Image (cartoon, grey):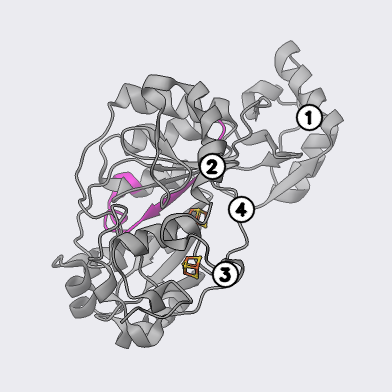
Amino acid sequence: MPRLIVAPFLDDRLVLNPGSGSGLKIPPLKYAELQHLTTHGGTVPAWLSAVVEQQWSLDLAGRTLTDVVLVRKESPYGYVRASYEINKGCDYDCPHCYLGQKKFEGITARQKLRLLEIMRDAGVVWLQITGGEPLIDRHFPLVYQRAQELGMMVAVSSNGSQLHKPAILDLLARHRPYRLTLSVYGATADTYDGFTRNRGAFDRFTRGLAAAQAIGLPVRLNIIVGEHNAHEIEDMKALADRHGFPHQVYTNMSPTIDGGAEPLPSQAEDYLRKRSPFTGCNAGHTFFHADPFAKVSICKVGRDPQIDLMTEGIEGLRRLGGIADSLQLRTGGCSGCQLSGTCWTCRPLAKLYQEAKAPRKTYCQHPDER
Ligand code: SF4
Ligand code: SF4
């Protein structure tokens, strides 16, 4: 496993320390020097050992460069971030879940490794492994470690149900993610277990949280607020503060990825937040989303059309930018809208709300038709 990753990132060249949130920019000439040393052999240059000593207290002086530093190649594809939904299966049954049918299925272990190599060749530096619940996938340890070996900064998004288990803690401690994002569904067993429809879930979650704190994992908490648990919002924030973990609060639920309205009634009306106007995003241009079958879309929301990376290979990614541009056009239920300049809902998300026949006030500036 590399101690450091050196990677192109858009117009920059970065030195990254897996497991740390910080990085360093280096000039193109220094990057070229490291590429040369990777190919022709040599030790860690003095300038690099000096900066990493200062930044991360890492002593790499005199070490053979390829033993400790992985220098990523430039990619002609230009993708720097990806999310990978390793499976859609989950051990919880939350009412707000945007996945709809959460089937536990996907590609083989061998295909998963191939997918990671395609991501590496596409330029992906930051990879989010998500689900469903990723930590219950039997291939998770393989995928997680391989992504790091390939020089990716790996974040994991989880419900935390498995975090109390020694094998998972050991894996995350040995190969630290740069971020571990955990959802919070309540501050008491009654509420948390009721929200997730899983008895004992709060106990497992809090044991996992304490274990993660004890070994200093870089946890960030997403506090999910719905009708069922809104009364504990302040207690959930206090839970995060007690552990010293940063947190964000989420109140607005999305329709399912198939345009189903099922999650919407679980929203706590009084807590819904007005979003800022949508000013564009790089979905499909610098990042993409891969589902459990390695079908790639511009993001988790705009899933249609998809590109099958297992049949098309990396070349399929060349079509993604065009797909992204077409998905952002204000067509369908947003055609001709005079308010699109101040709309806070991107077109792929608006399409899902429209398919779900959601009340307009939840996503749109126009009043509902009578
Ligand atoms: S949901 Fe919308 S804003 Fe978010 S990444 Fe997808 S297209 Fe962009
Ligand atoms: S305001 Fe409503 S109709 Fe107009 S672009 Fe936004 S979601 Fe579509």
Instruction: For mark 4, give the secondary structure.
Output: loop
Which badge, 2 or 3, is on the more N-terminal residue? 2
Q: Residue at x 42, y 27 (%)?
A: 115
Magenta part of the protein: which range?
Answer: 151-168
**In the image, is residue 206 above or below residue 103?**
below
Name the one closer to the observer, 335 or 114: 335
Which badge, 1 or 4, is on the more N-terminal residue? 4
Label 2 to label 4: alpha-carbon separation: 24 Å
Examine the structure image and report whether residue 166 is included in the region drawn in magenta: yes
Q: Residue at x 19, y 45 (%)?
A: 103
Label 4 to label 3: alpha-carbon separation: 41 Å
Check residue 21 in the rendering and tell me which mark sits there, or answer none.
4
Q: Residue at x 52, y 30 (%)?
A: 319
Label 2 to label 3: alpha-carbon separation: 26 Å
Q: Is residue 216 visible?
A: no
Q: Residue at x 48, y 71 (%)?
A: 247
Q: Which residue is mark 1?
A: 31
Label 1 to label 2: alpha-carbon separation: 27 Å
